[in-house]
Amino acid sequence: MISRVAIALLFVLAAGLSLAYARAPRPVIVIERPGQCVEATEVMRRDHMTLLLHQRDRTMREGIRTRPHSLAGCVECHASAKTGSVLGEQGFCESCHRYASVKLDCFECHASKPGRVSARAKP
Amino acid sequence: MPRLQARARLGPGEAVSDPERRGFLATAAAALAGVVIAPGIRLIEIAGARAPEEAASARVRWGMLIDTAKCASGCTECVKACNEENGLHGAGRPRTDAQWIRKIDLKDPRTGRQHSAPVMCQHCAEPPCVDVCPTGASFKRADGIVLVDKHTCIGCRYCVMACPYKARSFIHENLSEQKPAVPRGKGTVEGCTLCVHKVDRGDGTTACAQACKAAGHEAIVFGDLNDPQSAVSRRLREIPSIHLRADLRLDTGVRYSGI
Amino acid sequence: MATVIHRELQAAGWRFWGPLLAIGAVIAAGFAAFVHMETQGHWVTGMDNQIVWGLPHVFAVFLIVAASGALNVASVASVFGRVAYKPLAPLSALAAIALLAGGLAILVADLGRPDRLVVAMTHFNFKSIFALNMFLYNGFFALVAVYLWFMMERRMNAWSGAAGLAAFVWRIVLTTGTGSIFGFLAAREAYDSALLGPAFVVYSLAYGTAAFLVVLDLSWRWAGRAAHAETLARIGRLLAIFTAASLYMTAAFHLAKLYVTRSHGVEDFLLASGGVYPVLFWLGQVGLGGALPLALLYSRRTGGTRAGVIGAAVLVILGGLAQMYVTIIGAQAWSQPIFPGWQEQSSFFDGEVHPYAPSGWELLLGLGGVALAAALIATGLKALPLLPDEPCTASSSPQPTSPPARPR
C-alpha cells in the first residue's frame, strides 16, 4: 500500500519536474518559399504522415511518382535556406518532430536536402 | 507512331536535363496514343512512355541483354555509372560496401578462354528473394522489376542467403548524402533497381546501359521483353542467349549471350 | 504413481543472488554489444556481404533447436507414458520456453532494423519459411505454457497429456521449419536438401536433451541437493540414442551430397580442404560431439555416473555449436557458382572462399542470449514449484503407466 502511494507520488513529482524544467523549445516554423502548400495547413499538420504513407506505397509498389504528396516535394519547398536541409535544430521537419517528441526516421534513408529534380515533374 | 514522334523531338543531349518537359511530352504522347490508336489495339507500343499517374503494369516486362562478346575486360564504365546514378559511395571497406553491379572475369579452366560480364540483380520472374522475405519487403513490381521496400525490410538478410546471383547488399553503416530518387539506409538490404526512377521517368534506359553505349561497347541492351519490336527483343531473336543458373528456372529478366 | 512434491528453488541470499548477478552481467554485456552493433551498423562485426549470417546465428539457431529438444523429457513422460520422467516434466517445459526465448532474442538483436520487430509481426509473406516460423515459435511458447500450467494445476492435470501431445507434434513441425530455413535455399550448394529439416529434428533431440541435463544438474546443485544418479543415467541413455541418431543423419546428409557430382566441390570444402570447417566437423561435430559422448555414455565405468552423463551432455552441446558453425558459416564461406564450370573473379569476391572472423561483439551477443535463457530458468525455478523434491521415486526401471496417457 505504502509503496503504491510512493510510486504514485513519484509519478506526480516527475510530471511536475518535466513541466518545470524539461519544456521543449517551441518548433521553428519558417516558411521560406511562401505560397500554396499541396494541402491546407490544417490538413498538413494533422495528416501529412498519412498522405506521405499513401504516396509512398503508390510510388514504391506501382511506380506512380506524380508530385503532390511526395517526400521529395516537401524537402524541395521546406529545406532551410541556411542549411539547405529539413533537419537540424531549425529544420522544418526536425524542430517540430522534436517538439512533439515523434521519431523521425524518414531521413535515415531519404535525402534531407533537395537535389537535382529526379522524380518526374507534375504535368 | 505517337511514341516515335515524341521521341524524335527529344534530342539525345537533353534526355535527362529537362524532366518537366519530358513529363509533358510523355503525357502528351500517352494522350495522343489514346486518340490515335484504334480501340482494341493494346497500348503496349507506348509502354515506355506510360503516363505519370498510370501504375506500372504487367503488359511490360523490363529486362536486359548482356552481350559478353562486346563487353571489354577491364572496362568498368557500367559499374561507375551505376554508383554515380544511385549514390553508392562506399565506406572504403570492400567486404561490407554495397555493390549493385560488378564485373566478373571468367576463365574456362581447361581452354583458358576468357570472358568478362557485368552481373547485377537478374530481375527474376520467380525471385527467390521474394519467396523467402518474411515481411514481403522484397517484391516484384508488375513490370518485372524486383525491389526492396525499405520501409518494411527488417534487415534479416534471408534474401541475401537465397539469391543465386549475390545481387543483394546489406547496408552496414549509417549513410548520408543519398540521392533524392534513391533512398538507402543502414540496416536494410538493397540491390539493382533497374534504374526504376529512370524507367518511371520514361528514360527507357538504365545508367549502366547508357554508360556502356557511351564507352562505345553497347554490350548492355535494355528494354521491354514483352514488346516484340523493342531493341532487346529483336536482338534476343537474332543471337543465342542464356539465363544465368538456368538450372534454377527463375526466368531471369537479364540474359547473357556469348558464353 | 507416488506423489512427488515440487518446490521452488530454496536458495536465498548470496547463494541465489550471486549466480543471478553473474548471469545478469553477461546479459548486460550482450545488451551492450547489441546497442553497439545497432548504432554503428554491422560493419563492426565479422559479418559482411559474403558471410551475412555469423556467430550470433550459430548461437541463436542452436538455442532454438535445443529448445524444442529440451521438451523431450516432458514428451517422454506425457506422450510415451514413461512415468519415471514425469516429475521432471515441468522443468523440461520451462527449459524449452527459456531456450527458445534466448535464441529468438539473439536473432532479433542481430536484425538490421530491430526497431521494426512490429513490422515482422504484422506483415507476413506466407511463402517465407521465416514468416511461418514466426507463427511456429509463438505457438510453441503458447502451447508449452499451457502444457506447463496443465501439469502444475491439479484440476487441469487430466488434460496435460493432450497438451503434451500437441506440444510434441508442434515441436517436430517447428524444428523441421528451422532446418528448412537452410534446406530450401536451392542457390547454396551446401544446402539445397530436404534432409536438413528432418536432420534438425534429430539434432534437436540430442541438443535439447543435453541442454536439459545440464540445466537439471545445475538446478540441483543450486538447490543444494545431491544429483540423483539414477535419473541422470536414465536420461543419459536417451541422450546416447539421440546422439547416435544425429551421427546417422549427418552421415546420410553428406553421403547423399557426395553421390551427386555437382556438390563434390562443396563437400570437399566442408569435409576435407576448407580449413577450420573440416576441423570443426570431424573434431567438433563428429568427434567431441558424437563419438566421445557415446563412448562416455556406453562405457561401463562412466556410463551411469554423474560425471560421465554430464560430461557427455556438455560435449554434445559443444558438438552442436560446431555443427551450427559448419552448417551456417561454412556453407556461406563456399562461394556460389554464378557461371558453373567457369573460374570467376570479381570485386565482389566471386569465385573465392570467403573468410570470416567473428568479432567480440558477436560472441557477447550470443552469450547474452544463453544468459537470458539461464535467467529465465532461474526466475522460473525461484517463482514456481518446478524442482521435484524426490526425483523419480517411481520404480527404478521405467515402465509405462497403464494405459499410456491418451490425448483427449
Image (spheres, helix red, strand yellow):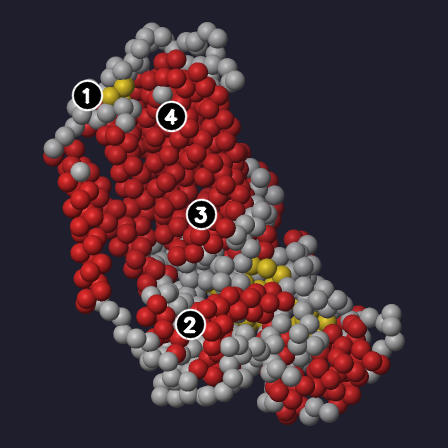
- Residue type at mark 1 is Arg
Quickly name the residue at label 2.
A107
Q: Would you place residue C320 above or below residue B23 in this image?
A: above
Marks 1/4 same chain: yes
- Residue type at mark 3 is Ile
**Chain letter of the residue carrying label 2:** A
Residue C171 or residue C295, whichever sits in front: C171
Give how far across and how far down residue C341 sits, in percent: 61, 58
| CB-based contact (under 8 Å), mark 4 and mark 2 | no
Question: What residue is drawn where x is 58% and y is 70%?
Answer: A59
- Residue type at mark 4 is Trp
Give how far across and how far down residue C89 sits, in percent: 36, 22
Quickly name the residue at label 4.
C149
What's the distance in space between the residues labelled 4 and 2, CA to CA? 47 Å
Question: What residue is drawn where x is 54% and y is 84%?
Answer: A117
- Residue type at mark 2 is Phe
What's the distance in space between the residues labelled 3 and 2, CA to CA? 34 Å
Q: Nearer the viewer, mark 3 or mark 2?
A: 2
Q: Is B127 displayed left or right of C88 in the figure? A: right
Q: Is A99 displayed left or right of B177 in the figure? A: left
Marks 3/2 same chain: no
Quickly name the residue at label 3.
C328
Residue C236 or residue A47, whichever sits in front: A47
Quickly name the residue at label 1.
C225
**Chain letter of the residue carrying label 3:** C
Alpha-carbon neighbours of circle 3 within 10 Å: few (<14), some, or many (≥20)? many
What's the distance in space between the residues labelled 1 and 2, CA to CA? 58 Å
Q: Secondary structure at mark 1?
A: loop
What's the distance in space between the residues labelled 4 and 3, CA to CA? 36 Å
